[in-house]
Image (spheres, rainbow, N blue to C red):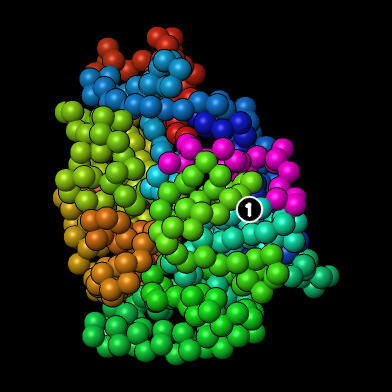
């Protein structure tokens, strides 16, 4: 059984339908290895990505196994019976043998990024996630708050149609030219080649691992000097690039990032920078004080009126302990996942599970990203879970749990890896403390729990290959004969095949 809070598959791509939405990574890196796609463009647009994911769901029969419009509020482990009880928002309960949390990394949009009085504004407030296509913004005065990945796509898409567009920038973002183009006959032929898709994936993976391994082998001081030196050269080149895109010298200066290239995910903008050379486009860097009835008031006392304000202010993310509410997930012996992460920081064996959380995994967890793509990471996590569940079935076991020793050994390797220490020094000391830059790459605790260090090519290859067997790090046990009935749905036995539950809310 699959539980999905929205009304169809594709997650991000059904929530984000704003003007200009598209991939900001090459299309070939956003596909499953078992389902290569004939992409039409180098950077596919949102509709094409959504159709690809929904086609996979149809081909693999997932529509017959899903319940849409369902939100899970609490998960409670029953150790005697070896089940999880899921409490839904509508009061219903579902009991399942296994739970796979597949909520992803980007959870819910931040409504206003802490700007006060948003409720006083009487115009149209538009979130980048959940765009209201019934609203006609043509000929209107519009403000966009934020200059991240979503804003990079929204701004150039709506600029030609609005009367005036102000973009409010707190932190300048690196914005490179987007090498997007439609595939011709040769490109389409490559898209039909499984070998091409495999080579593209491996090239991406090896390149990333080479960088990480080099960072681990060189002295930390040398790595930091190389990174800072490279970024200084890149910043000088970026200033020259801005001269070709933005006419106003003041805007050009404001658009040069203070932080380093790797403090945030670099973005590709097709037309974003040129917006500030339009007669109807303006960049505003004065801090926002509050919303007003008519629009926005900045800290210098200026109030500007708008018909529509777009909030492109980012998302709550799974790397923050605060994203796991206390009391929402309770494991063995009353173990509270939210409390644990607040007190001990983000951690998970192989990026998928932690002790005292039997039969439960993350599709994306702390130190889970293998450096290639989110899609490849999800595949590896799913393969890990499938191997453990298959082993449990073969052994007649009902409860599986990673051992404390295996988890602690893994986590110690993650946090003491030279790559992790370099990332933390670079992100926290050189970026956050010096430039006050906020990043998805580190959280409020100063951790950098997204990236999984390579631990060298050999271990990384072993970890991601078909030879990797995680079952040695788990305990397996059967529950008593009296408690081996199938999980129940509101007290009624569920079909045996529904004992694996993917929670996607």
**Total marks placed:** 1
Residue 348 image position (x, y, % from top left)? 28, 49
Query: What span is colored magenta in the figure?
Result: 117-140
Residue at image location 62% in from the left, 27% down from the top: 64
Horizontal arrangement in the rendering, residue 150 relative to residue 280 (left or right): left
Is residue 134 magenta-colored? yes
Viewer can see residue 387:
no
Find numbered disc 1 in the image and state the secondary structure of the residue it sits on.
Answer: strand
- Name the foreground residue: 435 vs 370: 435
Horizontal arrangement in the rendering, residue 393 relative to residue 135 (left or right): left
The quarter of the displayed image where residue 438 is located:
bottom left
- Name the foreground residue: 314 vs 145: 145
Residue 17 image position (x, y, % from top left)? 65, 46
Magenta stretch, overall SS: loop
Residue 231 image position (x, y, % from top left)? 41, 84
Q: Is residue 404 above or below residue 488?
A: below
> Circle 1 is placed at which residue position?
142
Residue at image location 46% in from the left, 28% down from the top: 71
The quarter of the displayed image where residue 299 is located:
bottom left
Residue 445 image position (x, y, % from top left)? 23, 56
- Name the foreground residue: 56 vs 10: 10
Q: Which residue extends farthest front?
A: 301
Q: Is residue 200 above or below residue 328?
A: below
Horizontal arrangement in the rendering, residue 103 relative to residue 189 (left or right): left
Residue at image location 35% in from the left, 66% down from the top: 437
User: Dot 1, crowdedness within 10 Å: few (<14), some or many (≥20)?
Assistant: many
Viewer can see residue 344:
yes
Residue at image location 22% in from the left, 63% down from the top: 415
Q: Which residue extends farthest right?
A: 185
Is residue 288 magenta-colored? no
């Amino acid at each position: 059984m699959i539980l999905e809070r929205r009304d169809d598959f594709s997650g991000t791509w059904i929530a984000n339908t704003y003007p200009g939405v598209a991939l900001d990574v090459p299309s070939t890196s956003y596909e499953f290895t078992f389902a290569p796609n004939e992409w039409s463009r180098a950077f596919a647009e949102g509709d094409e990505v959504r159709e690809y994911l929904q086609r996979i769901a149809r081909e693999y029969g997932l529509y017959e196994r899903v319940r849409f419009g369902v939100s899970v509020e609490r998960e409670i482990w029953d150790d005697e019976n070896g089940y999880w009880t899921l409490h839904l928002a509508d009061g219903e309960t579902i009991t399942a043998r296994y739970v796979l949390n597949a909520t992803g990394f980007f959870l819910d949009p931040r409504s206003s990024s802490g700007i006060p009085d948003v409720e006083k504004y009487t115009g149209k407030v538009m979130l980048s996630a959940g765009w209201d296509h019934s609203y006609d913004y043509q000929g209107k005065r519009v403000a966009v708050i934020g200059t991240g990945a979503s804003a990079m796509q929204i701004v150039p898409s709506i600029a030609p149609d609005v009367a005036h567009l102000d973009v409010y920038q707190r932190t300048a973002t690196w914005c490179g030219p987007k090498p997007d183009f439609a595939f011709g006959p040769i490109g389409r032929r490559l898209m039909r080649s499984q070998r091409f898709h495999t080579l593209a994936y491996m090239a991406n993976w090896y390149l990333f691992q080479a960088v990480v391994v080099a960072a681990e082998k060189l002295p930390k001081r040398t790595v930091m000097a190389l990174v800072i030196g490279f970024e200084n050269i890149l910043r000088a080149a970026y200033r020259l690039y801005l001269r070709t895109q933005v006419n106003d010298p003041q805007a050009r200066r404001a658009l040069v990032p203070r932080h380093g290239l790797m403090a945030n995910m670099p973005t590709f903008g097709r037309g974003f920078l040129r917006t500030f050379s339009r007669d109807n486009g303006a960049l505003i860097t004065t801090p926002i004080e509050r919303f007003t009835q008519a629009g926005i008031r900045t800290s210098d006392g200026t109030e500007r009126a708008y018909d529509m304000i777009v909030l492109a202010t980012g998302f709550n993310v799974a790397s923050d302990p605060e994203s796991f509410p206390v009391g929402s997930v309770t494991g063995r012996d009353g173990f509270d996942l939210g409390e644990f992460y607040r007190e001990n920081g983000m951690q998970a064996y192989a990026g998928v599970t932690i002790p005292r959380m039997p039969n439960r995994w993350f599709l994306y967890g702390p130190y889970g990203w293998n450096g290639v793509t989110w899609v490849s990471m999800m595949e590896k996590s799913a393969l890990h879970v499938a191997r453990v569940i298959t082993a449990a079935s073969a052994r007649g076991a009902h409860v599986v749990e990673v051992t404390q020793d295996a988890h602690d050994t893994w986590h110690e390797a993650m946090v003491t890896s030279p790559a992790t220490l370099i990332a933390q020094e670079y992100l926290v000391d050189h970026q956050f403390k010096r430039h006050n830059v906020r990043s998805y790459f580190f959280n409020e605790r100063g951790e950098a729990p997204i990236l999984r260090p390579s631990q060298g090519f050999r271990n990384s290859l072993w970890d991601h290959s078909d030879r990797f067997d995680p079952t040695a790090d788990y305990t397996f046990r059967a529950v008593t004969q009296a408690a081996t009935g199938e999980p129940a749905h509101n007290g009624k036995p569920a079909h045996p095949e529904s004992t694996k539950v993917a929670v996607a809310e």
